Amino acid sequence: MAVYKREPPHEKGESGIESMGQLTTIGFDADDTLWQNEQFFRMTQERFAALLADYTDPSHLADRLLAAEKRNLGAYGFGVKGFTLSMIETAIEVTDAKVPASVIRELVDAGREMLSHPIELLPHAREAIEALAGRYRVLLITKGDLLDQERKLAQSGLGDLFDGVEIVSDKTPGIYAEIFARHGDGTASAMMIGNSLKSDVLPAIEAGGWGTFVPHDLTWELEHADAPETHARYNELPHLGKLGAVIAAIEESDI
């Protein structure tokens, strides 16, 4: 786990603003919550399918790649590097180890290109964070390749808005409990916001916090999960522009 913690710049007296009580700490996911990410994986997967079109059909290849990604999570973790290694492994498997070296070279190049793609902020991302800074401890909590996540945060222009940044190997109730205890007042007064029910929302709720789901048009298959039928601490928004109203409602409630 990589941890970055700044002295909170938003103490009452400096900004004159403080949280109204129910919430004190708010965490944001990064990829596909604040900026585009999955679209680059989809584009690379299409390139992967084209390179191996002579060996297997695209739908079969997609299933084999997904199985490799799932199998390799424990060893490679989340992110571009694990995805690239899984593509290479799958290419070797589906070609009975006959994949040309030139194809392996193209897959390595494709992974490297993914690690340098430009950052495209999603609608309302900056405005949502700026509206909270000064009233709450605002955190970025993300998983994936350390260097890649650091690069994306730096290029996003959002880094100075966060009171803390956590780059973790996975997102579990225990991880959220630890983060919100270290940076804030515990999960009971914390909210996690993200595009993944499985990683961002459900484990934060299980830890005792609020979970706010902001769906993205593209979601990795291994991040799919069912939303809770009813839960007082669960919210779903069409986009981050609606976040202020949800937080205001929580502050007025006694949940």
Image: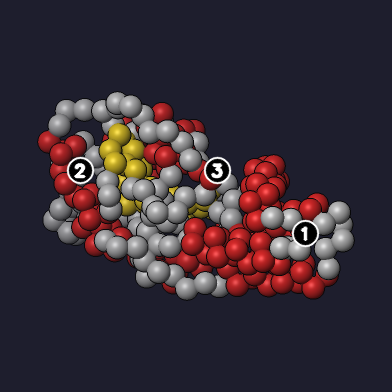
Q: Quadrant of residue 189?
A: top left
Depth check, mark 2 against mark 3: the one in front is: 3
Question: Earlier along the polypeptide chain: callout 1 or callout 3?
Answer: 1
Question: Earlier along the polypeptide chain: callout 2 or callout 3?
Answer: 3
Please give the residue where the numbered disc 2 appears in the rendered image. 246
Q: Is residue 121 above or below residue 135?
A: below
The front one of 152 and 165 is: 152
The front one of 131 and 178 is: 131
Number of numbered tags placed on the structure image: 3
Which quarter shows the C terminus? top left
Q: Which mark is residue 71?
A: none
Depth check, mark 1 against mark 3: the one in front is: 1
The front one of 6 and 115 is: 115
Residue type beneath disc 1: Tyr
Could you say where residue 149 lies in the image, as x and y percent from the top left? Answer: 51, 61
The residue at 34%/33% (across/down) is 209
Q: Is residue 16 left or right of residue 239?
A: left
Q: Which mark is residue 222?
A: 3
Mark 2 closeness class: few <14, some 14–19, many ≥20 residues within 10 Å: few
Classify mark 1: helix, strand or loop: loop
Q: Is residue 136 left or right of residue 140?
A: left
The residue at 80%/52% (across/down) is 93
Residue type beneath disc 2: Val
Is residue 82 in view? Answer: no
Could you say where residue 72 lies in the image, as x and y percent from the top left? Answer: 69, 46
